[in-house]
Image (tube, rainbow, N blue to C red):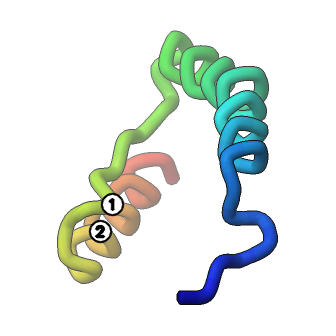
């Protein structure tokens, strides 16, 4: 089994901390402004692509 050097508890904790401090506030900020578009990335790639294209068309 291969383990990447950055695949450890400390790195994961740091990534979560960075998300909570830097990314989550942006999500809340843009959501309150009504300009955040939520795309479900768990769908088939074709559906994700179509959702992104439709979202962009709506913002032109």
**Cα separation between marks 1 and 2:** 6 Å
Q: Quadrant of residue 7?
A: bottom right
Q: Nearer the viewer, residue 32 or 20?
A: 20
Q: Is residue 45 left or right of residue 44?
A: right
| Neighbourhood count class around disc 2 (C-alpha, 10 Å): few under 14, some 14–19, many 20 upward | some
Q: Which mark is residue 31?
A: none
Q: Could you tell me if the residues under marks 1 and 2 are in contact, i.e. CB atoms within 8 Å?
A: yes
Give the class, few, some or many, for how many residues have Cα within 10 Å of label 1's Cα (few <14, many ≥20): few
The image shows residue 60 at horizontal and vertical percentages of: 51, 53
| Secondary structure category for the residue under label 2 | helix
Query: Depth check: 33 or 59 in front?
Result: 33
- Which residue occupies the extreme bottom position in the image? 1
Which residue is the extreme one toward the front? 1
In the drawing, does residue 60 fall left or right of residue 21? left
View extreme (top): residue: 32
Q: Which residue is mark 2?
A: 48
Q: What residue is rendered at 40% in x and 59% in y?
A: 57
**Foreground mark, 1 or 2?**
1
Q: Which residue is mark 1?
A: 41
The answer to whether 51 is drawn above or below residue 3 in the figure is above
**Residue at 20% over, 66% down:** 43
Q: Is residue 45 left or right of residue 5?
A: left
Q: Nearer the viewer, residue 24 or 34?
A: 24
Above-or-below relation of 50 to 36:
below
Q: Position of residue 22 (x, y in %)?
A: 77, 28
């Amino acid at each position: 089994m291969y383990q990447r050097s950055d695949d450890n508890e400390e790195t994961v904790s740091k990534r979560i901390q960075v998300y909570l401090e830097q990314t989550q506030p942006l999500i809340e900020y843009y959501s309150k402004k009504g300009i955040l578009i939520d795309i479900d990335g768990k769908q088939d790639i074709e559906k994700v692509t179509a959702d992104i294209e439709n979202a962009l068309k709506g913002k032109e």
